[in-house]
Amino acid sequence: MSVDGAVIAGKVVSNVNGMTDYWLEYGTTSSLDSETPRQAIYTPVNTPVSVTVGLSGLERDTVYHYRLCAEDEDAGACGGARVFRTQEVACGETVTTDVMLTGTLDCGPESPGPITGPDGLVVGAAGLEINLGGHTLIGPTGFGVGAVDGIDDSAGHDDLTIRNGQVRGWDRAIRIEGADRAQIRNVEAPAVLVGLEIRGGAGTAIRNSLLAGFLGGLRTVDHDGLAVTGNELRAGSAGTANVDGDDSVFARNVVTGGVLNAGIHVIGSRNRVIANRVSGFGTTGILVAGGSDNVVDGNEISEVRLVDGPPSNGDGIFVAAPAVGTLLRDNYVHENEGDGIEVESAGTRLRGNRADTNDDLGIQAVAGVIDLGGNSASGNANPLQCTNVFCQ
């Protein structure tokens, strides 16, 4: 679907073998005063055959009535009348008012056009809502082809809302730079490289969405007050979720994939990583790389693989030395190929964590950590089970 074209799919059937003509009758009223040129296709007896018919030269943001018709050597008939609405926006267009898709907006190689720029939709004003309407914004399905974006808010317009649909086939599904208070809700963003990239700004909230990409589902740089709740995040190669900033909440997400790096990578202070399920990574499930006073609470981490390379190997949770004052509480780490929990920062507090059936220690901690009690470990390959923390 585009602003001036559409591709209609249907099926034709005949009770005799042979060629069958098919066409569309269409118009802006139920009178259906236009029709497409006839095309022909071979139809085996009583076997529905899929066909598509393209329409062009249509009016923008307009309701069209249509029906598919067919005729074989014996007789002809038309299907029931249906309607569609052309899009109000074109591929690559800069939008300055709210948008709601009325069907799939195809900006890929098979797009009916027009395409006015390399990206899908470019945000041109603050306070916009892009309602995908349950439809899909389709990109060129490239790999680093100029890092094109499905929805591009690199100009930094605040209070953007994107909701209710899919953005796929782009290098980056959604790109936001220098903007505050964006809202991403009920969006599927399976990108080629990165599902959602955010740089600068503050206060973005992401809820009930799917973010995926070869290099990560979510990448943030210097963005404070991020709220990521109830999402699914996937990666093909690198880490899935990079949380770079302060005062953010990353809660109740399912995080999977990633051959290298961490599932959730925290850089900054006063961030809370709560009740996530993380599995299937190389190096680390949850990495607290720096900052101060971060909380990792109630997460389940499993099946982290042993991959050579910094900063750790196969650990469920890893707290690096530069991280100050981290609290690890009530996490369950199991079946990881390294330690369940490894802590290299003295002053880290541990309470109520459970570490079972990991391929090295349950909890490996440096001297100087603060043991708040209630930690347990069993079935880990290293008979010590825990170091510098008492484990039941």
Image (tube, rainbow, N blue to C red):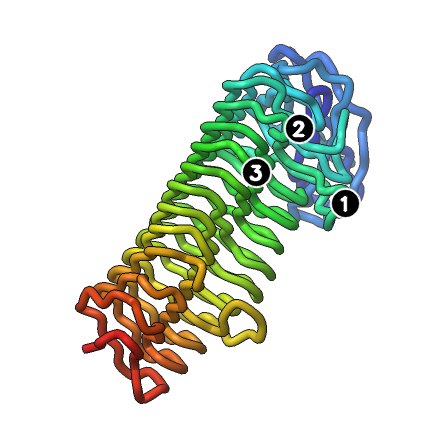
The spot of residue 90 in percent (x, y) is 69, 23
Which mark identifies residue 145? 1
**For the point 74% across and 25% down, which residue is it?**
55
Q: Amino acid at mark 3?
A: Arg
User: Looking at the image, can residue 86 be seen?
Assistant: no
> What is the CA distance from the residue labelled 2 to the residue labelled 1?
23 Å
Q: Which amino acid does the dot numbered 1 rest on?
A: Val
Q: Which mark is residue 200?
A: none
Height in image: 352 above or below 209?
A: below
Residue 1 is tagged as 2
Image height of 272 relative to 322, above or below:
above
Q: Judge the density around disc 2: few (<14), some (14-19), many (≥20) Cα neighbours within 10 Å.
A: many
Rounded to the nearest angstrom, the CA distance separating label 3 from label 2 is 32 Å
Residue 51 appears at what percent x and percent y?
71, 39
Dot 3 corresponds to which residue?
A: 199
Instruction: Decide: few, some or many residues near mark 3? Use Cα within 10 Å; few <14, some 14-19, many ≥20.
Output: many
Camera-nearest label, 2 or 1: 1
Name the residue: 37% across, 59% down. 277
